[in-house]
Amino acid sequence: MPRKASIINEGSEEDANDLILNDPQNVDETVNLSRMLAAVMNYLTDEDLEELDVEYLLDATEGLREWWEQYRESNRKQMEEEIKKSLGELSLEELEKIREKIKEKQDKR
């Protein structure tokens, strides 16, 4: 039985890949992501590299900073939900500290 399940999963994955690869916009995005990944890997595997400089990498790789900002923003909702769920587990003192930080941020605006 497990064999059949993996065959079904493979077929579904192939169908999804066909849908992705048949859309020119997705192909362009895939090519762009591959280019950025190659640039990052080249940087990381540089034998002369003594210290990682993420800011340099974001500046030196065309489109990487924009992609990173979009990625972070897309995860914002998930982060907000995780925070909401964890609030009930915090002590009153911890909640008050968070409240103070929020107020400080609002006052700076």
Image: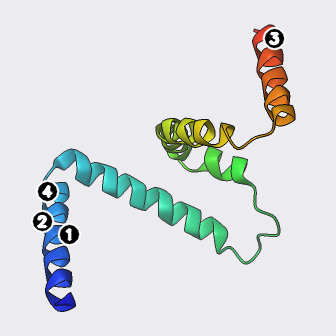
User: In what element is the residue under mark 3?
Assistant: helix
Check disc 3 and give the amino acid type. Lys
Task: Name the residue beneath numbered marker 1.
Answer: 13
Residue shown at 66% from the left, 38% from the top: 88
Task: Name the residue beneath numbered marker 3.
Answer: 108
Task: Name the residue beneath numbered marker 2.
Answer: 15
* Residue 15 shown left or right of residue 85 in the figure: left
Mark 2: few, some, or many residues within 10 Å (few <14, many ≥20)? few
Q: Position of residue 41 (x, y in %)?
A: 57, 69
> Do residues under tags 1 and 3 come within 8 Å of each other at their CB atoms?
no
Front residue of 69/34: it is 69
> Do residues under tags 2 and 1 come within 8 Å of each other at their CB atoms?
yes
User: In what element is the residue under mark 2?
Assistant: helix
Mark 4: few, some, or many residues within 10 Å (few <14, many ≥20)? few
Front residue of 92/15: it is 92
Residue shown at 53% from the left, 47% from the top: 64
Front residue of 39/82: it is 82
